[in-house]
């Protein structure tokens, strides 16, 4: 969700808004803006649930939730949070060889 929200916000800010201002074409803003708005709500619920499950502090949780409002921040915060979780919880992704054979 972080990547999707961030990419839509980047397209909105760096493509849609300049097209609307310079060329008077608001179609990109209306479509991408609506998609970003809807998916940002999904991002908020997803990030809140994840933050609660891993026991993230209130301050960090708020920063993660606000990251979807600044272009590129959601991507950076997702990467930093993933590294923090891996470091603090000694988490390592499950490798295909580790999965039980069925």
Image (tube, helix red, strand yellow):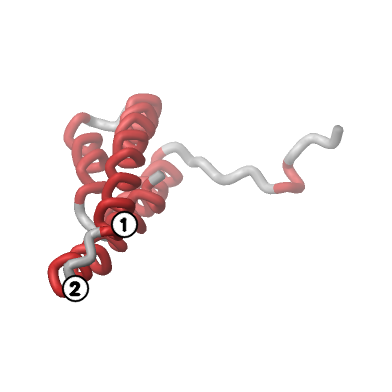
Vertical comparison of 68 with 100: above or below: below
Residue at the image point whose x is 79% and y is 35% from the top? 100
Q: Any mark on residue 23, and which?
A: 2
Q: Position of residue 3 (x, y in %)?
A: 40, 53
Within-10-Å neighbours for mark 1: few <14, some 14–19, many 20+: some
Within-10-Å neighbours for mark 2: few <14, some 14–19, many 20+: few
Of circles 1 and 2, the one toward us is 2
Image quarter for residue 51?
top left
Residue under label 1: 76
Image quarter for residue 10?
bottom left
Q: Is residue 83 left or right of residue 92?
A: left
Residue at the image point whose x is 86% and y is 32% from the top? 102
- Most extreme residue toward the right is 102
Q: Position of residue 60 (x, y in %)?
A: 22, 38
Q: Secondary structure at mark 1?
A: helix
- Looking at marks 1 and 2 on the same chain, the residue that comes earlier in the sequence is marked by 2
Q: Position of residue 46 (x, y in %)?
A: 38, 33
Residue at the image point whose x is 27% and y is 68% from the top? 15
User: Which residue is at the front of the view, 25 or 39?
Assistant: 25
Q: Are marks 1 and 2 in contact (CB under 8 Å)?
A: no
User: Which residue is at the front of the view, 26 or 48?
Assistant: 26
- Most extreme residue toward the bottom is 22
Q: Secondary structure at mark 2?
A: helix
């Amino acid at each position: 969700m972080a990547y999707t929200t961030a990419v839509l916000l980047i397209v909105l800010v760096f493509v849609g808004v300049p097209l609307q201002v310079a060329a008077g074409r608001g179609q990109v803003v209306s479509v991408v803006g609506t998609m970003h708005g809807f998916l940002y709500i999904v991002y908020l619920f997803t990030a809140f649930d994840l933050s609660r499950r891993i026991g993230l502090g209130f301050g960090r949780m708020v920063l993660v939730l606000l990251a979807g409002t600044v272009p590129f921040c959601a991507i950076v915060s997702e990467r930093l949070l993933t590294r923090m979780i891996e470091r603090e919880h000694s988490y390592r992704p499950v490798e295909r060889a580790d999965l039980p054979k069925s």
